[in-house]
Image (cartoon, helix red, strand yellow):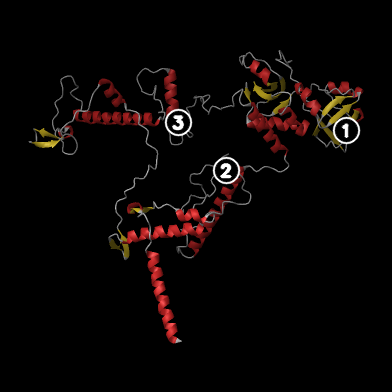
Amino acid sequence: MRPLTEEETRVMFEKIAKYIGENLQLLVDRPDGTYCFRLHNDRVYYVSEKILKLAANISGDKLVSLGTCFGKFTKTHKFRLHITALDYLAPYAKYKVWIKPGAEQSFLYGNHVLKSGLGRITENTSQYQGVVVYSMADIPLPYKGGTTPYYIRDEEMDIQRFQWLAHHPQAQPAQLGP
Amino acid sequence: MEGQNVEELLAKAERDEAEKLQRITVHKELELEFDLGNLLASDRNPPTGLRHAGPTQEAELRALARDNTQLLINQLWQLPTERVEEALVARLPEPTTRLPREKPVPRPRPLTRWQQFARLKGIRPKKKTNLVWDEVSGQWRRRWGYQRARDDTKEWLIEVPSSADPMEDQFAKRIQAKKERVAKNELNRLRNLARAHKIQLPSATGMHPTGHQSKEELGRAMQVARVSTASVGRFQERLPKEKAPRGSGKKRKFQPLFGDFAAEKKSQLEMLRVMNSKKPQMDVTRATNKQMREEDQEEAAKRRKMSQKGKRKGGRQGPGGKRKGGPPSQGGKRKGGLGGKMNSAPPGLGGRRKGGQHHGGKRRK
């Protein structure tokens, strides 16, 4: 377990900033406690200082996870967001998309959402903008699929598609702390 | 009328004389103390004049300075003079004031191995005579050095000891032994030096070839040998089935796990600020590298033109040696401190530069 290097932090921030923009500052600098990012086995965990101190007592090979896993760094040092980050990204999301109940199930199983399935959408969402998808009951939705969700408006074909991120095949075992 | 003018002129001349004399002679209650070796004059008179003057003391201070300097110069004029290359020069006496140290006191050096040993055993250096009686030449000769008393190297006959191989070259053996002694001495001297300066010596464990070395030792020795070239092993070929060594790169250093949380937060916020700002931040290294490259290209182009001109004019010596100094360092787009070397073309470097290559100076990736 170690803190992130400059390069790694930059890559990660750039990715997260696509979804929450300047609100990322609120994640870094929280009024209710010191939270930090730590790297363990190529995964980035967002963890409070208290939990971090407890986790330091566990040897590296026995430690599975701590805090919240935001994502992981791939072999070529690109950052992949995981759905476990959704709880932290959703409240700060800049561009939100609400989808109708009919399309919700389809989206959860990994399909694209057409324009007809779109309920509401924040203004000024540009094409290929990273968005957070909500159901009509304001619940942020993840799903098992390919890439992080973004909004495409294809003018010629007039389809709007959404795709979201790979949920890691293994379930997250024994999380330490919230 | 004229008489009056003449009188006035004379009076004026007299007044001028008096003034000049007054300027040269200064009256002081206490004599100044002079240290002409350091060109020093100490004035112990109480500065009553200054106290009366009040806030604006400029004129008084200046007058005081002038007076004291005048006295010092008067003293200097009294010194013995001589002529050095058409200039009249006064010879200053030895300085009497002792100036304080310029640099701090040198710290004591650590003892060498021999000194430690001698101290332990209580060995004190025996005073030896410089000259020794030499039987062979029948005169007093030095103990060591040029034309020494018992010179091993000058012997023309060496008896082969009974235990030694009759075919061995005793002379060569002697020379070899001397070389080894010298090398050993040099090694010890360098070790002592390294210990004194607390430099770590490269360890040579396992590099002494015996007949029986383990596989790991041999491997290590091989690695060291590979890296001990001028290019630090970059162009050393590998044997056909030899594998590249694992983990021979530099070990990365990370921040500590519980480092300063506040500092971490600050640096992350700073990074975010930079990311969010609309202006693109300048990468200092890239900017300096680009500038250096441009300068090199300019130099190369100029040199090519010079050489062409020279050839055309039938090999006439153009102004090749003189080169104008590098372009002004503070170009508009430079920000922050020195990212790399600013002046890539030091003036007066001369014409012979290998095609735009940069002498020294590191380019950072």
Residue type highlighted by circle 2: Gly
Say which quarter of the image contains residue B196.
top left
Residue type highlighted by circle 1: Ile
- Please state the chain letter of the residue tagged with numbered disc 3 in the rendered image: B
Per the image, label 1 sits on a secondary structure element best described as: strand
Q: What is the x, y in percent for residue A23?
A: 76, 31
Give the side of residue B311 with respect to residue B161, left or right. Answer: right
Q: Which residue is mark 3?
A: B227
Per the image, label 3 sits on a secondary structure element best described as: helix
Of the numbered discs 3 and 2, the one sitting upstream in the chain is 3
Residue sitting at 91 percent across and 22 percent down? A101
Q: What is the x, y in percent for residue A135?
A: 88, 24
The reply to whether dot 2 and dot 1 touch (C-beta < 8 Å) is no
**Which is nearer the eye, A153 or B281?**
B281
The reply to whether dot 3 and dot 2 touch (C-beta < 8 Å) is no
* Structural crowding at the residue carrying mark 3, measured as other residues with C-alpha within 10 Å and reported as few (<14), some (14–19) or many (≥20): some
Q: Which residue is mark 1?
A: A159
- Please state the chain letter of the residue tagged with numbered disc 1 in the rendered image: A
Give me the disc on residue A132: none
Residue type highlighted by circle 3: Val
Per the image, label 2 sits on a secondary structure element best described as: loop
Q: Nearer the viewer, mark 2 or mark 1?
A: 2
* Quarter of the image with the N terminus of chain A in it: top right
Whether residue A76 is visible: no
**Which is nearer the eye, B84 or B71?**
B71
Q: What is the x, y in percent for residue B44?
A: 39, 51
* Structural crowding at the residue carrying mark 2, measured as other residues with C-alpha within 10 Å and reported as few (<14), some (14–19) or many (≥20): some
* Quarter of the image with the C terminus of chain A in it: top right
Q: Nearer the viewer, mark 3 or mark 2?
A: 2
The Cα atoms of the two marked residues, 3 and 2, are separated by 30 Å
Q: Which residue is mark 2?
A: B339
